[in-house]
Image: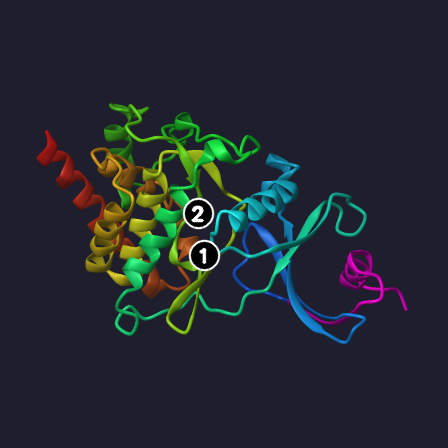
Amino acid sequence: MIPTQFEQLVHKMQPGSKLLRASALQGGISAQVTALEVEHPDGQIQKMIVRVHGDLDFNDNPNIARDEFKLLQILRDAGITAPQPYYLDPSSAIFGRPYLVMEFIEGTTDFDPAAITDAPHQIAAQIARIHRIDIAQHDLDFLPKFDPQKTIQRPAKLDDSLQEGRIRDALEKVWPLPGRNALTLLHGDFWPGNILWRDGQIVAMIDWEDALIGDPLLDLGNGRMEILWSFGADVMHEFTRHYQTLNPIDLADLPYWDLRAALRPASLLSEWAPDAAAEQRMREGHHQFVAQAFQKLSEQA
């Protein structure tokens, strides 16, 4: 019998180990994510995750598996709750491209703010801890820098249902922003779906392939919109307040970064939403999020 790709992987990673089970995980968009259950020669059974990056990310950065592996090592050394990297295969022998193997962490991305009353504080503490990593002490030169020009490149067709034209008009007047905060490590795709919970506690921040160096307000704006979508404005505001107490950066330009975040779902919201009812809720939340950003800008004028 010809060994499967994952059987080949297990043998290459640790000869003598045996693959017991391989299960594709749902929710992976930018990568093929598979959970493996492996029996080691000493009889120990261990779960682990295999990430094989998709065409879009791999074509943009052929070293993305190496870079994510290295970043996870740095995060663990810095005390960030991220999966431990186990193995990097830089060859393309098994999957046609490099891949990495990392720790499987038991947890769920679903949580109830009513049951976990300090959830906004835990989320704020997690992202603030990431933003406080001293990038001068770590070799992070392999990560990309935020490119402000990509934000204001107008598409051929605007999504008027999400006020894309109005948002771009406002951003084009001020972009690029002056940069009031020190550049720091950013998760790059900060939202509740990339946070694992267990027993009321955050146990890991996952999916680091979009990490970059830039203004911490990028992560903050993205997180605020997603938190409003998932849990409402009150949780969003409490998250923001607690983040500011932990990492007192300059928030003067936050409304612009909120608007920048609001551009992300333009022409994509129907694809992001799991069903029609969710899409309607997201559209209403998006309208509320954009309105509060413009209100803050009018108050600053």
Name the foreground residue: 22 vs 46.
46
Q: Is residue 258 visible?
A: yes
| 99 sits left or right of 297 in the view | right
Q: Residue 6 lies in what quarter of the image?
A: bottom right
Residue placed under numbered mark 1 in the picture: 194
Residue at image location 81% in from the left, 59% down from the top: 8
| 290 sits left or right of 47 in the view | left
Residue at image location 44% in from the left, 28% down from the top: 147
Sooner in the amino-acid sequence: mark 2 or mark 1: 2
Colouring method of the image: rainbow
The x, y position of residue 12, in whole percent, is 81, 56
- Give yes or no for contact between labels 2 and 1 (Cβ–Cβ under 8 Å): yes
Q: Residue 38 lies in what quarter of the image?
A: bottom right
**Looking at numbered disc 2 in the image, what kind of residue is underneath it?**
Asp
Q: For mark 2, does the 10 Å Cα neighbourhood hold few (<14), some (14 to 19), or many (20 or more) residues?
A: some
The x, y position of residue 238, in whole percent, is 21, 56
Dot 2: element: loop
Q: Quadrant of the C terminus?
A: top left
Name the foreground residue: 185 vs 260.
185
For residue 184, above or below residue 118: above
Mark pair 2, 1: CA separation: 8 Å
Residue at image location 61% in from the left, 58% down from the top: 33
Residue placed under numbered mark 2 in the picture: 189
Q: Which residues are magenta?
A: 1-23
